[in-house]
Image: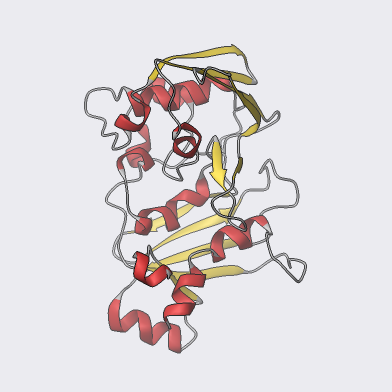
Amino acid sequence: MKTLRILAGLVLALASTGVWAAAAPVDGGVLKFAVGAEPPNYDCHAQTSFAFIHPVRPHYSTLLKFDAANYPKIVGDLAESWTVAKDGLAYTFKLRKGVKFHDGSTFSSEDIKATYERIRKPPPGVLSVREEGYADISLIETPDPQTVVFRLKKPNASMLANFASPWDCVYSAAKLKQDPRFPERNVMGTGPFTFGEHVAGSHWTGKKFDGYFEKGKPHLNGYIALFVAGAPMVNALAAGEIMAEFRGHSPADRD
């Protein structure tokens, strides 16, 4: 059971993007899985738990991400490429073109800037638990819609890993301008799945986003996250009512 749970933690990421070692991915189907807790709100920047990440993160993209098939390698998500200045004081990212938010609006460098300004300098009433990780940033520049530059006060060897945090969901600058707390109650990203519904105490659903920037993905038609833990979860897994339990793991579990 422990092995199944450990492997399950990668299932949604792999199934949605098609990173499989052997057989070619098959399109279609809905992944049904369990998470042990329900998101207290919808804002990635205020959260730290994997119980939040598994149902919510598939709606969003990040600047960088950890390669699910080759962890801890860092690869681009919304970033197509990047360079780091020799003195370590500037990180320049070239962004993907043609990326759309789920409402049809076009993604640009302004969305990256607005997202990270919110993380590093949260407005009144907004909680950012990763604010400290970006304290070394002095300025964020957007010379054009496909370029964003982070200028640092001093070199920080952890910066690329920070940018790959799965909780650094990229939000719409337009939505944040209207309401800095918009993500607490609304779900609207550029990820592979659009928001379906959240039924309190029951489940969370995602639906395939046909406009996702990685052509041919996601392979799943959708997913259903059931909020269930303990004996009921074990019984549902044994009965085949769910395919996996998603959760975080202690070092002992991982080893």
In this picture, is 180 found above or below 61? above
Identity of the residue drawn at 67% across and 42% down:
211
Q: In which quarter of the image is residue 74?
A: top right
Task: Please name the colour scheme applied to the rendered image.
Answer: secondary structure
Query: Residue 221's spot in the image, x, y percent?
Result: 63, 61
Q: Quadrant of the N terminus?
A: bottom left
Q: In which quarter of the image is residue 85?
A: top right
Identity of the residue drawn at 45% across and 42% down:
165
| In the foreground, 49 or 31 | 49
| In the foreground, 219 or 66 | 66
Count of marks placed on residues: 0
**Residue at the far left in the pictured view:** 125
Q: Quadrant of residue 157?
A: top left
Tell me if residue 97 can be seen: yes
Tell me if residue 242 can be seen: no
Q: In which quarter of the image is the C terminus?
A: bottom left
Query: Residue 138's spot in the image, x, y percent?
Result: 39, 14
In this picture, is 209 found above or below 3? above
Query: Residue 246's spot in the image, x, y percent?
Result: 43, 67
Identity of the residue drawn at 61% across and 33% down:
104
In this picture, is 234 found above or below 24? below
Residue 141 in the figure: left or right of residue 27:
left
| In the foreground, 29 or 161 | 161
